[in-house]
Amino acid sequence: MTFVQDEADPISPVSIDHHVDEVWADKRGGTLREIYNFIDYHFEREGRYCRARMYLDDPSSVTVYGPFSARDSLSLVDDHQLEADVLGYLGRRFGDVKRL
């Protein structure tokens, strides 16, 4: 598929990570209680940061966190353009975009 300028994404992730978190009842390799299989999308612009997480058991839904003042910060900032651009990117790919 070829995009014309008007259809281009306003932002792209700087990285995408696939993780699996396992919660064991006792020791690793014992009784597996829970497993979380997810993909994190990382967006940055001018030092500000947003993250979005999609769990692979519900691939049509994604949750957005931020924008934060920096990647290693939990300090929320008002950056309406970054937020709008991230939501635009994700809205083209997911049927359900949630905010936290």
Image: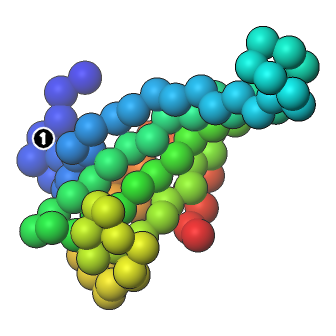
Please tell me whether residue 38 is drawn above or below residue 77 in the rendered image. above
Residue 20 picture location, percent across and down: 59, 27
Please tell me whether residue 12 is drawn above or below residue 58 in the rendered image. below
Quarter of the image for the C terminus: give it: bottom right
Relative to 63, 47 lies left or right: left
Residue 70 picture location, percent across and down: 25, 69
Observer-nearest of 47 and 94: 47
Q: Which residue is mark 1?
A: 4
List the single residue furthest toward the front: 27
| Location of residue 67 by image quarter | bottom left
Observer-nearest of 96 and 6: 96
Taking the image as drawn, is residue 82 in sight?
Answer: no
Taking the image as drawn, is residue 52 in sight?
Answer: yes
Q: Residue at 74% of width from left, 19% of height from top?
A: 28
Residue 53 picture location, percent across and down: 52, 47
| Location of residue 68 by image quarter | bottom left
Look at the numbered disc 1 and give the secondary structure of its residue: loop
Q: Residue at 35% of width from left, 70% of height from top?
A: 73
Q: Residue at 33% of width from left, 84% of height from top?
A: 77
Observer-nearest of 73 and 29: 29
Q: Residue at 56% of width from left, 55% of height from top?
A: 63
Please tell me whether residue 21 is drawn above or below residue 43 in the rendered image. above
Observer-nearest of 91 and 86: 86
